[in-house]
Amino acid sequence: MLELIEAVILGVVQGLTEFLPVSSSGHLLLGQYFLGLDQDRFGLSFDVALHMGTLVAVVSYFWRDLIRMALAFLRSFGHRDLVNDADQRLAYLVIASTVPAALIGFLFEGFFENTVRSPWVVVINFVLVGVLFLVAEAAGSRSRQASKLGFGEAVGIGLAQATALVPGVSRSGATITLGLFLGLRREEAARFSFLMSVPIIAGAGGLELAEVIASGMSTHESVLFATGFVTSALVGYFTIRFLLDYLTRHSLRAFAYYRFAVAAVVAVLLVVF
């Protein structure tokens, strides 16, 4: 029963922090360090469940956009029009943004997982990215649509996404921040961030899922898999809906202040204990 409760908690944490600009890896690392909530203890299958749950969440929310983009991409083989066809251009922009994140993740994921997993790294990045939130809010013009981005800009956002391999950065936080610097409206930057996360999560999760299927799961692992999957999917879906609605009327400042507060508390605990 205790493991089921922990699985639910980890699913909630994953569903919330994967999409809110607060860093899922940072929160999971801190949860492991201070509370012993280590998702690795549940095995690879549970890690896959959390990733597949968040993938289902973003696909369920953006399925209309994804279908339009897929059809536009197929249409481009017969008639490519990246100037006038917004869905076609957006599809190619998402592809362009995926390449650097996929390459860096494939080549250096082991380095990031083993070398920079420290609570102090999380504290530093919570503060650093929080400061960037405030600067981006002050500097961004917030007038562009994501489909108007240049391909070099999309690659840059992809590089920003790759920085989320470092605990405490946040995939959505890094990409939304750069989107604001490039003049995107907040909700447009968030929408593009979520759309570009689909191939990354699907690719990484798909490889892990194939490994899990090949090795099989026990009944106990299957129960934990289902628990983590359903929890992260449901929480992730409502988190996406909340954030997009929130960003139409509010800035990122609240998330910056949240990051500063958590960083301060964690720093005090690390020094005292």
Image (tube, rainbow, N blue to C red):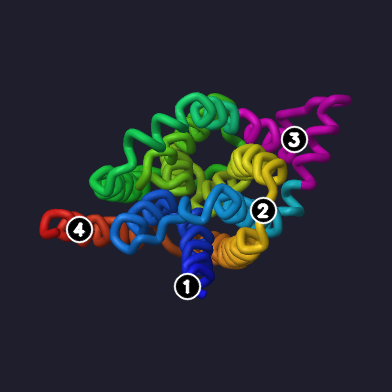
Magenta segment: 67-96
Q: Upstream in the sequence, badge 1 or badge 4?
A: 1
**Residue 134 picture location, percent across and down:** 31, 50
**Which class describes the residues within 10 Å of circle 1: few (<14), some (14-19), or many (20+)?**
few
Residue in the foreground of this view, choosing between 103 and 116: 116
Q: Is residue 205 above or below residue 236?
A: above
Q: CA distance from mark 2 to mark 4?
A: 41 Å
Q: Upstream in the sequence, badge 4 or badge 3?
A: 3
Q: Upstream in the sequence, badge 1 or badge 3?
A: 1
Q: CA distance from mark 4 to mark 3?
A: 45 Å
Q: CA distance from mark 1 to mark 4?
A: 30 Å
Q: Amino acid at mark 2?
A: Met
Residue indicated by mark 2: 217
Residue indicated by mark 1: 2
Residue 212 figure quarter: top right
Residue 139 figure quarter: top left
User: Of helix, strand and loop, which mostly describes the magenta segment?
Assistant: helix
**Residue 23 picture location, percent across and down:** 41, 51
Q: Upstream in the sequence, badge 2 or badge 3?
A: 3
Secondary structure of the residue carrying numbered label 2 = loop
Q: Amino acid at mark 3?
A: Gln
| Of the two numbered discs 1 and 4 in the rendering, the one whose residue sits closer to the viewer | 1
Q: Is residue 85 above or below residue 264?
A: above
Residue indicated by mark 4: 264
The numbered dot on residue 88 is 3
Residue at (47, 34) in percent of width and height = 162
Q: CA distance from mark 2 to mark 3?
A: 40 Å
Secondary structure of the residue carrying numbered label 1 = helix
Q: Upstream in the sequence, badge 2 or badge 4?
A: 2
